[in-house]
Image: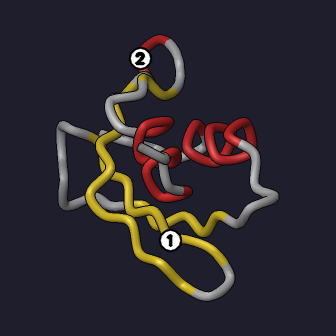
Amino acid sequence: MDVSFADRWFSALDQRQIGTGDGRWTAQVVAVHHEADGLWVQVAPVSDLSATILIHVSATTSLDEVLDTLEKQTVR
């Protein structure tokens, strides 16, 4: 079975540990929304699923770019 673009992003981000030390948090993918120009991936810390972060990814977006963005988010 082929893995879709959305499935790859889900697998890459869901339950991923983000950050280090006291700022470390676990990401949960809440939803993946398809658009003509890519995907919108909705991520939240497992400790507060109401604190979602929405990230736009395209075919050229790297995982490192997304992880860098997520690491800059303050999660309480």
Q: Residue at x 50, y 55 (%)?
A: 4
Where is residue 62, by image quadrant?
top right
Q: Callout 2, which amino acid?
A: Asp
Q: Is residue 14 left or right of residue 66?
A: left
First reached walking from the N terminus: tag 1 or tag 2: 2
Residue 71's tag is none
Helix, strand or loop at label 2? It is helix
- What residue does disc 2 label? 22
Where is residue 67, by image quadrant?
top right
Q: Please, is residue 14 above or below residue 53 in the view? A: above
Where is residue 1, by image quadrant?
top left
Helix, strand or loop at label 1? It is strand
Give the CA separation, mark 1 to mark 2: 28 Å
Q: Residue at x 70, y 66 (%)?
A: 58
Q: Position of residue 71 (x, y in %)?
A: 58, 36
View extreme (front): residue: 1
Residue nearest the observer in this picture, 58 or 49: 58
Q: Please, is residue 48 above or below residue 52 in the view? A: above
Query: Can you say which quadrant of the picture contains the C terminus?
Result: top left
